[in-house]
Image (cartoon, grey):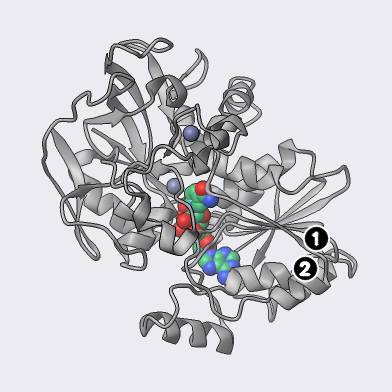
Amino acid sequence: MRALYWNGVNDLRVGTVKDPEIVNPHDAILRVTLSTTCGSDLHFIDGYIPTMKAGDVIGHEFMGVIEDVGPEVKKVKKGDRVVVPSFIVCGQCWYCQHDLYSLCDNTHPKPELQEPLLGYPTAGIYGYTHAFGGYAGAHAQFVRVPFADNDCFTVPDGVSDEQALFLSDAAPTGYMGADFCNIRPGDTVAVWGCGGVGLMAQQSARLFGAERVIAIDRFPERLAMAREHVGSETIDYTQVDNVPDALKEMTRGRGPDACIDAVGMEAHGTGLQYAYDRLKQTLRLQTDRGQALREASLACRKGGVLSVLGVYGVIDKFPMGLIMNKGLTVRTAQQHGQAYMKRLLGHAQKGELNPSFLATHRFSLEDAPRGYDMFKHKKDGCVRAVFVP
Ligand SMILES: NC(=O)c1ccc[n+]([C@@H]2O[C@H](COP(=O)([O-])OP(=O)(O)OC[C@H]3O[C@@H](n4cnc5c(N)ncnc54)[C@H](O)[C@@H]3O)[C@@H](O)[C@H]2O)c1
Ligand SMILES: [Zn+2]
Ligand SMILES: [Zn+2]
């Protein structure tokens, strides 16, 4: 089959690779209908997250039609149109039983790669480094879905392929980030980042009842999407002296009730702190540029919630004293998509959540390296590049 694979830092290629096969009785093989890019991919494409190997098929945000199932698959069958969350979960372990799906204990085939850093392994993820399980990704004609009964969700009529596609990763991540905020009527939620994750966090904050949503980014077209598709107020961080001060002013001196970081380790910024982060990251003295997370911690009102969706490795100058003294609640996780999927499909069916506006650009799978280039460099207003195998 044809697939997009990582060949080295900033080197993606399309080639012919071995077709996936049913390995375990609870596996399914999915014929991928659509797949898309994610900001998380950029971290290993840029070489900040190690343990990729040349030839690894990438991609973790996808939907498709079931082509074949193993003998123990009971709930889904050949021909079903399904969406698959990006984390692979067993459905049986203590973590799965407690809705902490991305922490599943049974789907990381090499826990020894994570234990020295994290203490315990997380769940495996499609197409996302060997440190996260080394599973083949979904920018391909076919992909193996282990534990198909837990991980394949049938897409109801009335929900298009393009809507379903984003329920795989960007939408559940944003929805979880808003859920973390314990939103009450009258609340103001500020969201750093207007990529797919940030925009979905903003739309979800509205669904959870936020009165005001304030979005921060620097790309005019992304800020326009936040205004037009979510009704967010916006801050272009290149146009203000200081984002926390701007937020303080917009919230009558109290600060947002909750702050969502949908930026992560490759934050951009202005000023001395950004130059310092950039230098230390280039010299590999830290993996992260933490501008958004520091600003969110500073801007949040006392006793508020800091909801961290951006991916981080090792961050320098993390303001723990500030978090402690202001009594912030920090909530963070890789997305627990399986916990939210039924609600998300319901919201999509009722038209309350429509992520398809994220699909700004479409490419054939053969053209996927160009799609990633446009996505990475935000060329031509690209928010998500969608691939059609
Ligand atoms: N927790 C999870 O399960 C999960 C899932 C998906 C993605 N992520 C992470 O979420 C983050 C965002 O993902 P995405 O796909 O939306 O990425 P993206 O690259 O499409 O968007 C990131 C946005 O952040 C903006 N940004 C950069 N620096 C900023 C700053 N200082 N202030 C405000 N905005 C700034 C960029 O301009 C860009 O629009 C990434 O770190 C990604 O790895 C986490
Ligand atoms: Zn992702
Ligand atoms: Zn599990």
Q: Is residue 139 above or below residue 279?
A: above
The quadrant in which residue 270 appears is bottom right
Between disc 1 and disc 2, the foreground one is: 1
Q: Position of residue 165 (x, y in %)?
A: 43, 32
Q: Position of residue 243 (x, y in %)?
A: 70, 73
Q: Nearer the viewer, residue 324 or 341?
A: 324
| Residue that numbered label 1 is attached to | 256
Q: Nearer the viewer, residue 253 or 126?
A: 126
User: Residue shown at 38%/25% (left/top)?
Assistant: 147
The quadrant in which residue 323 appears is bottom right
Q: What amino acid type is highlighted by mark number 1?
A: Pro
Q: What amino acid type is highlighted by mark number 2?
A: Leu
Q: Secondary structure at mark 2?
A: helix
Q: Callout 2 environment at 10 Å: few (<14), some (14 to 19), or many (20+)?
A: many
Q: Position of residue 77 (x, y in %)?
A: 35, 10
Q: Nearer the viewer, residue 63 or 340?
A: 340
User: Residue shown at 82%/74% (left/top)?
Assistant: 325
| Residue that numbered label 2 is attached to | 247
Question: In the visual, does 331 lie left or right of 121?
Answer: right
The tag earlier along the polypeptide, 1 or 2, is 2
Question: In the visual, does 1 lie left or right of 199?
Answer: left
User: Residue shown at 32%/48% (left/top)?
Assistant: 110
Question: In the visual, does 213 lie left or right of 16?
Answer: right
